[in-house]
Image: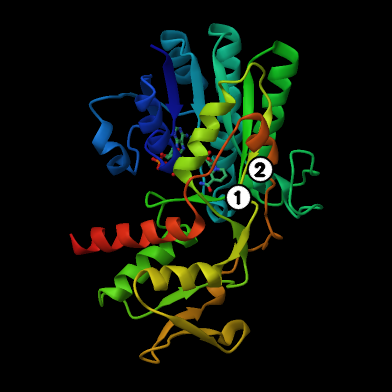
Amino acid sequence: MKKALITGIAGQDGSFLAEFLLSKNYEVIGLAKKEFTTSENIENIQDKIKIINGDVADFDSVLKTVKDIKPDEIYNLAAQSFVADSWNNPSITAQCNALGPVNILESIKRESPNTKFFQASTCEIFGKPKDSPQTEETAIHPITPYGIAKLYAHLMVETYRKNYGVFASCGILFNHESERRGKQFVTRKISNSVASIKLGLLDHIELGNLNSQRDWGYAPDYVKGMYLMLQQEKSDDFILATGKPVKVRDFCNIAFLSAGIELEWEGSGLEEKGIDKKTGKTLVKVNPKFFRPTESNIYVGNPQKAETQLNWKREVSFEQMVEKMVQHDLELLKK
Ligand code: NAP
């Protein structure tokens, strides 16, 4: 039986990955902070996994964990993962997102050199991308504290791979969402608000830039890509993306449709409104409070390398994903 250590196991990706690896007959061990915030994500598997309390930013606890377990594979998914928060907490972001992965790499080098390592890298390392779609060769120039911290880790993975022969791969992950996405992220904010509006619990939703675009995939598809990266003979970096950017406005259209509400749009800029076609009621308003300090250019990734070399396939379409998120939030709120 193979042993996998997943950091950030109670997060969106960590919990889906744990379920996936259990289905592949792995022994799954999770590293999570003492008081982690999303235990409901792993409620259904809590008696099948082992949780070790630890912080990736604490080198001694990481070293001890790696030494004791000597896992076959480590998936580093722990992060301060909300880009907007990285402006408020740049130091915590750097400790967790930049130094955390280095603590793991150094522990592997010292105590468990046969362990394979996956690092959750991000499209935010491209900053204002010079190419569209972005590939593994696109120039890197992050412009947020989150992206800059992740870039440090990204380059350290390459350094440990080249200099110490550690099997270490980065997934350059474009946005991926699900019914387990944190509510601070715009996609979950929309699905949760649509469900609340549908049930009469909320009047309308306020959003930032409706023209903002993201390449949004479904998280369970992405964790399969992470697994595939560690099943290769050689470690390497791969983009996981859909290749199709979608605007926030279009996310809203599909989310409301999933709840049986058709929207039409009136006005522009800060005055733009999403209106219920049937009742004429305003359901979406723009609020400049939600604009980002630096609105990055369009992130859209080319997943061709992962598709051809890893045989990575996405199984859930954008529309299906939004539908799942809204239906899940409707069920949650009804409970
Ligand atoms: P998530 O839901 O926020 O999960 C991150 C997990 O890491 C949480 O369980 C969090 O626990 C834990 N964590 C935070 N700081 C930690 C620390 N110092 N030590 C140990 N655990 C810590 O994020 P996700 O969406 O699953 O993303 C997984 C990884 O992919 C992250 O590294 C993220 O940056 C990266 N990524 C995600 C996306 C995306 O679209 N989802 C895109 C690109 C890259 P608490 O909640 O208790 O803090």
Q: Which residue is mark 1?
A: 242
Q: Which mark is residue 303?
A: 2
- Going 64% across and 63% down the picture, which residue do you hit? 293
Left or right: 137 with respect to 285? Answer: right
Residue contact at pointers 1 and 2, CB within 8 angstroms: yes
Image-quadrant location for residue 8: top left
Q: Is residue 114 above or below residue 98?
A: above
Considering the numbered disc 2 on the image, is that residue within a helix, a strand or a loop? loop
Q: Which mark is residue 205?
A: none
Estimate how packed mark 1 is, as few (under 14), some (14 to 19) or many (20 or more) residues with alpha carbons within 10 Å.
many
Left or right: 164 with respect to 266? Answer: right
Instruction: Inspect this view and state whether residue 190 appears.
Output: yes
Q: Position of residue 166 (x, y in %)?
A: 65, 14
- Going 38% across and 68% down the picture, which residue do you hit? 258
Left or right: 274 with respect to 121? Answer: left
- Amino acid type of the residue tagged 2 in the rendering: Pro
Q: Quadrant of the N terminus?
A: top left
Left or right: 180 with respect to 319? Answer: left
Considering the numbered disc 1 on the image, is that residue within a helix, a strand or a loop? loop
The residue closer to the viewer here, 175 or 220, is 220
- Going 37% across and 78% down the picture, which residue do you hit? 261
How far apart marks 1 and 2 lie (CA) works out to 7 Å
- Amino acid type of the residue tagged 1 in the rendering: Thr
Estimate how packed mark 2 is, as few (under 14), some (14 to 19) or many (20 or more) residues with alpha carbons within 10 Å.
many
Q: How is the image coloured?
A: rainbow
Q: Is mark 1 within 8 Å of ligand 1?
A: no
